[in-house]
Image (tube, grey):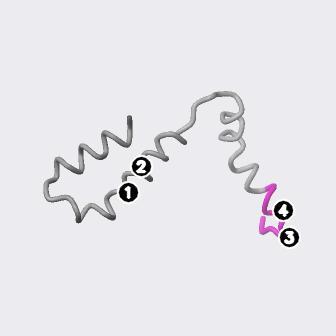
């Protein structure tokens, strides 16, 4: 089935991901906090050229997670 208009695409996508939507409503699990920490680490890694030693980077990562 090829969607003809945007609402058909929405319905098709919802049908495809229906089990995931149900699970998101049923369970309180989320990877949002983990994704936030990963984003902060990536930002830190972009500026890690200022660190002279690798363990300084690891210390900064531990401080982010605290």
Q: Any magenta on residue 10?
A: yes
- At label 1, counting other C-alpha atoms closer than 10 Å, the crowd grade (few under 14, some 14-19, many 20 or more) is few
Q: In the rendered image, which residue does mark 3 sit on?
A: 5
User: Label 4 belongs to which residue?
Assistant: 8
Q: Which residue is mark 1?
A: 42
- Report the Cα–Cα distance between label 1 and label 3: 38 Å
Residue 8 lies, in percent from the top left, at 84, 62
Tag in front: 2 or 3 = 2
Q: Secondary structure at mark 2?
A: helix
Q: Is residue 5 magenta?
A: yes
Are the residues flagged by discs 2 and 1 in contact, CB closer than 8 Å?
Answer: yes
Mark 4 crowd level (few <14, some 14–19, many ≥20, 10 Å Cα): few
Contact check, label 2 and label 3, Cβ < 8 Å: no
Bounds of the magenta span? 1-11
Within 10 Å of disc 2 (Cα), the crowding (few <14, some 14-19, many 20+) is: some
Q: Which residue is mark 2?
A: 38
Left or right: where does residue 15 sit relative to residue 65? right
x%, y% of residue 20? 65, 41
Precedes in sequence: disc 1 or disc 3: 3
Q: Position of residue 57 (x, y in %)?
A: 24, 51
Q: Answer with left or right where residue 62 lies relative to residue 28.
A: left
Quarter-wise, where is residue 1 in the image? bottom right
List the single residue furthest toward the left.
Answer: 53
Instruction: Tell me residue 45's x, y (percent).
Output: 31, 59
Q: Nearer the viewer, mark 2 or mark 4?
A: 2
Give above or below for 11 relative to 32.
below
| Front residue (pair 4, 49) | 49
**Given contact means CB atoms under 8 Å apart, are the residues at marks 4 and 3 in contact?**
yes
Tell which circle, 2 or 3, labels the residue nearer the N-terminal end. 3
* Viewer-side label of 1, 4: 1
């Amino acid at each position: 089935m090829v969607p003809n208009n945007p609402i058909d695409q929405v319905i098709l996508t919802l049908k495809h991901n229906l089990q995931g939507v149900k699970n998101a409503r049923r369970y309180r699990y989320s990877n949002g906090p983990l994704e936030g920490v990963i984003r902060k680490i990536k930002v830190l890694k972009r500026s890690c050229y200022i660190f002279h030693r690798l363990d300084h980077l690891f210390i900064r990562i531990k401080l982010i997670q605290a």
